[in-house]
Image (cartoon, rainbow, N blue to C red):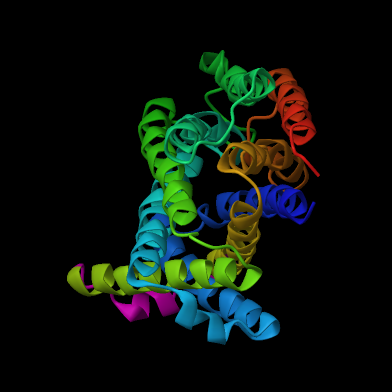
Amino acid sequence: MLGLVCAVMSAVAFAANDTALRRGILFASVYKSIIVTVPIGFPVFLLAITLTNSWSSFRALDLAQFLFFGSAGIIHFIFGRYFGYKTIESLGATQAGPIVQLGLLISVFFAYHLFDEEITNIHIIAIFLIILAPMIILLGHEGDKFTRSGIEMKYKAGLFWGLSCAICYGISPLLVKSGFSNYSLEITILAGFISYISAISFLILIMILTRVRIRDIIEMDKSALKWFTITGFMGSSAQLLRYIALGLIPISIVEPIHRTSVIFRVMFGFVINRNHEIINVRVLLGVALSIIGMYLLILQIDF
């Protein structure tokens, strides 16, 4: 039950992350959003380690686990996050989901072949619905080129960034799962912590190589900084919950449920960003299909 709750709550937090990000990039670039949001994961996981007294569990990790978790962090939190945020910049949070969802195919395919996770007919139907739902949202986009606030939707660029993000988001959970030679709550939290440390280190390297001026970050628009801070906190919380879920239940369950964040993206987008998003009947139909798919997956969990 804990794994299920964490997977669903992760989807909710991830949707809040994308909704806040959508507002933030109205004031500053995606590149700056990465510089602000990634480091926030450090204190979030540090607090989780302290509260669960997980420090001693570091001794239980071997080099291979450090490499798996570290690689997952760089792929997901640097490359995947950048591509995902560019997709949101191009299409908005509600329409970005359809393409990013395709990463689910990668996760489930390899979960079946590498980890011998069982895939039933109900799994296939549920995954089909979860993938079909956001694709329906994207249909007929020729009539939805501008939001109410006048933001232009860039569908070709969104497709490119979205597919790039889908590859990263599909690979990263496989690396995390590969590092779980033995499960405990402490190990899963340390996995996320190692992933963020690796991502932050890689980010610092990129900033040095590209000669990013700290002054440009300090003088960032205050509205952008506020929304990016919210984005970073919600994203880190979503990842903490996701790592715990991956340690408790199969990838073939966690990843489809995690991707039902499209449901909550629409809800949060309507409340917070309705003038900056495309929300119509197609979107609502997609949400309904996603809910059905998630329900079918929940039925497959052996409590």
The answer to whether residue 219 is magenta is yes
Which residue is found at the position 44% from the left and 27% from the top?
155
Nearest the camera: 111 or 72? 111
Residue 130 versus residue 68 in the image, above or below:
above
In the image, what residue occupies the spot 48% across and 77% down? 60
- The part of the image, by quadrant, that contains residue 162 is top left
Magenta span includes 188 = no
Q: Could you say where residue 131 lies in the image, as x and y percent from the top left?
A: 58, 24
Rendered image quadrant of residue 287: top right
- Residue 258 x %, y %: 63, 43
- Residue that appears at 59% across and 63% down: 183
Magenta stretch bounds: 210-223
- On the picture, is 8 further left or further right than 14? right
Between 11 and 216, the one lying in front of the other is 11
Residue 173 picture location, percent across and down:
48, 49
Decide: is 281 above or below 261.
above
Q: Is residue 221 visible?
A: no
Q: Position of residue 237 (x, y in %)?
A: 64, 64
Residue 25 vertical placement versus 53 (above, below): above
Placement of the C terminus among the 4 image quadrants: top right
| Position of residue 81 in the picture relative to residue 97 (left or right) | left
Q: Taking 25 as reference, is 186 left or right? A: right
